[in-house]
Each structure stands twice: as structure tokens, then as C-alpha cells.
Amino acid sequence: MDRLDPHTTHGTTEPMIDGGQGAVAGGAPAGAFSPWSYRDEAAVADADLVGYKVEATDGGIGKIDSASHEVGGSYLVVDTGPWIFGKKVMLPAGTVNQVAHDDRKVYVDRSKDQIKAAPEYDETSHSDPAYRDKLGGYYDDSYGNLPPGTAR
């Protein structure tokens, strides 16, 4: 059996490679997690995502109210409707796994519980660097809390 070069990115079912960042098809790219940038393989490409439904790893969480395509500062604001009693959540672009434009759905790589436990969204401070650091740090840290075998 040939061994793979550990310094090259290869698709694998092993979630803990390359320093714990994984290189699973459809998951985060190997290397550092970048919370505020869409992944190349997510197929976002400056599309207007407003109105798309958002699917967590364990079910729907709501519809996109607004979306940003700022370089290094992209995010989604999701209206959770009855799921969290009409609250909104802000998801950094790096959590987006895939966009299914035909179905108007965005798939994120976090569970409902992980999203619900994130720092609370506040429309008045969403552009505040301290809030963004806190939110980005939460989602960065939550990659280490995914169960073994989960796509990253």
C-alpha cells in the first residue's frame, strides 16, 4: 500500500490530519480555518443568498436575512423563525460547506446546538471588531469540539 505524503492535501475519511484541520471532501480545507471567508468549494461566487434556507448538520435553522461578500469579512445573518423564537444568528462565511442554488439552500458544518450556543447576534455590534473576534473565535474553537468522524 502506498503512503500518502503528509504535506499534501488528500481527500480522506480521517478527520484529524494536518494538525487537526481535516481534509474531508466537502469539509474545511486543510490548513487554518478562516471564519470570515467562503471556502472555494462552497460554490458561493458572489451569489445573492438572501432568502435561501440554511441547513445545519442536523436540520434546518431558518432563512438568510442578509449576506456579506466582504473580502475577509463575509458572513450570513439567519432569521431562525420559531426555532430560536424569532432571533437571528450570524454565521461566519467559513462555516458554509456548500450552496445548492437549484434548491436555494446553504449547508453549514455546525449542529443546531453549536449555532444556538454561539455568541448572541446584536444588529448594533455585528461590525464591531471585538464581536467579530469573539464570534470567529467561537466557531474556530468549535472545530476542535466536533465528534470523531465528522466532516470538517
Image (cartoon, grey):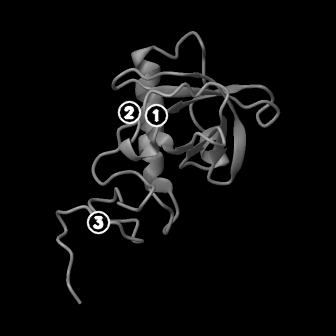
Q: Which mark is residue 66?
A: none
Residue at the image position 44 percent from the left and 27 percent from the top? 46
**Label 3 Cα crowd, 10 Å radius (few <14 / some 14-19 / many 20+):** some
Q: Quadrant of residue 69?
A: top left
Nearest the eye: 74 or 111: 74
Position above or below: 78 against 147: above
Marks 2 and 3, Cα distance to the nearest angstrom?
22 Å
Residue at the image position 29 percent from the left and 66 percent from the top? 10
Residue located beneath label 2 in the image: 37
Q: For the residue labelled by badge 3, is the local secondary structure a helix, a strand or a loop?
A: loop
Q: Quadrant of residue 51?
A: top right
Residue located beneath label 1 in the image: 93
Q: Which mark is residue 10?
A: 3
Marks 2 and 1, Cα distance to the nearest angstrom?
5 Å
In the image, what residue type sits under mark 3?
His
Position above or below: 93 against 57: above
Q: For the residue labelled by badge 2, is the local secondary structure a helix, a strand or a loop?
A: loop
Left or right for 89, reference 80: left
In the image, what residue type sits under mark 1?
Ala
**Label 1 Cα crowd, 10 Å radius (few <14 / some 14-19 / many 20+):** many
Mark 2 / mark 1, whichever is N-terminal: 2
Q: For the residue labelled by badge 1, is the local secondary structure a helix, a strand or a loop?
A: helix
In the image, what residue type sits under mark 2?
Ser
Badges 2 and 1: C-beta atoms under 8 Å apart? Answer: yes
Marks 1 and 3, Cα distance to the nearest angstrom?
23 Å
- The outermost residue toward the bottom is 1
**Label 2 Cα crowd, 10 Å radius (few <14 / some 14-19 / many 20+):** some
Nearest the eye: 127 or 10: 10
Q: Position of residue 140 (x, y in %)?
A: 41, 42
